[in-house]
Image (cartoon, coloured by chain):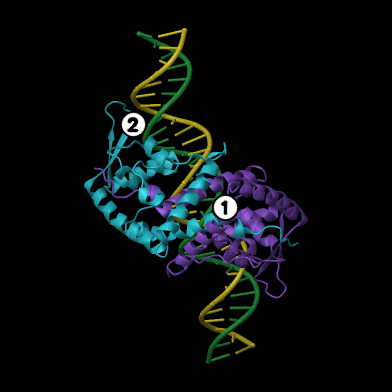
Chain colours: A cyan, B purple, C green, D yellow
DNA sequence: TCAATATCATTTCTTATGAAACGAAAAGTC
DNA sequence: GACTTTTCGTTTCATAAGAAATGATATTGA
């Protein structure tokens, strides 16, 4: 049996998955091979860096990973000395997580490499191209937001790069 | 410690991962909840449908999953009667996989729903918008192709939708 | 005030994935 | 024509992720 009905090559969900997977795998060579971090660890690290202190719950909402994944990532980062965990004074259930100096140093290194990685990929893209790309992705998110069954979109960070969104 | 150095909100690999994950999860409600298929199973099904017969190896190269994953997906699809496996006459190592009538029927249903899903997401996108989106994704793939360490890009299907690529 | 409920982080438990190992079959080499 | 090497598909094996359960603390309400 054979059918020409349907072609994955132009099916958006498939193309996005392939593209994202190729980029993620390549990027993971930066923080994985060189710094020994997993994807969840690296995401947690970046998010924690942008606040003074964060709880697992807060990170979970931002980072688009499940709570156990975040919890494990945080524990591992604590083991390697990149973050510090302390029980909250006001609410003993909460764990306050913050970057250590070592974590800050590592992040600085990875940040530099991540930026250069992105620049490498987007090298041939003009500012207009980048703007276009982000606007299109934004519109896709908007379309998803209208679906009641869609997963929540992680909140944007406050300080936006207005140079990109125009 | 706190740093405003780096903002994931505008980091392309992160944004792509989030977007792709949101869309994939939503789509998986179609083929998962309603048809009981996993992502690898659904991809295998579609790829096999486009050829008379395919080996595990061939599928593996197209589908962007590892060989064991493909092998398992095929076995499961055989169990549920959607594909048939036969040892090749010419080469006893190869397994020829083809869709059964039941597989064809299921695919027809999913295809319809997948199309309507995509249309639902891209509903507000004009033809020009879609073209733009695909061109930008294409350029990102091209940039990745230049990296020696990047994973191979799965080959495009032959019959391209020229209406999109212009 | 004390029980019932809700919230937070962690810990099972199950499942899925990919790397490496494996056995079978073909191709290459002498 | 046997021996080595390569290729194919499957099967371990180890690891990672999410669902559900757990334990601890807060909050609510009678």
Residue B153 placement (x, y as % from top left): 52, 65
Q: Is residue B161 visible?
A: no
- Residue shown at the point (70%, 66%) measured from the top left: B53
Per the rendering, the mark at residue A13 is: 1
Residue furthest out toward the left? A101
Residue situated in front as seen by the camera: B112 or D4: B112
Q: Which residue is mark 2?
A: A94
Disc 2 and disc 1 on one polypeptide chain: yes
Does label 2 or label 1 sit earlier along the sequence?
Answer: 1
Chain to which mark 2 belongs: A
Question: Foreground: D27 or B94?
Answer: D27
Where is residue D2, by image quadrant? bottom right
Mark number displayed over residue B51: none
Q: Chain of mark 1?
A: A
Q: Tell me: residue A114, above or below residue A101.
A: below
Per the image, label 1 sits on a secondary structure element best described as helix
Kind of element beneath mark 2: loop
| Alpha carbons under labels 2 and 1: distance apart | 37 Å
């Amino acid at each position: 049996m054979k059918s020409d009905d349907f072609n994955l090559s132009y099916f958006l969900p498939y193309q996005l998955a392939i593209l994202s997977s190729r980029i993620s795998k390549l990027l993971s060579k930066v923080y994985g091979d060189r710094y020994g971090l997993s994807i969840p660890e690296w995401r947690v690290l970046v998010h924690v860096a942008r606040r003074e202190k964060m709880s697992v719950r807060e990170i979970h909402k931002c980072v688009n990973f499940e709570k156990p994944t975040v919890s494990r990532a945080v524990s591992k980062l604590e083991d390697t000395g990149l973050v510090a965990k302390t029980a909250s004074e006001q609410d003993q259930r909460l764990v306050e997580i913050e970057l250590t100096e070592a974590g800050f140093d590592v992040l600085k290194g990875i940040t530099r490499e991540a930026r250069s990685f992105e620049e490498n990929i987007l090298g041939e893209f003009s500012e207009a191209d980048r703007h276009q790309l982000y606007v299109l992705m934004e519109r896709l998110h908007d379309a998803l937001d209208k679906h009641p069954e869609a997963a929540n979109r992680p909140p944007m960070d406050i300080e936006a790069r207005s140079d990109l969104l125009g």
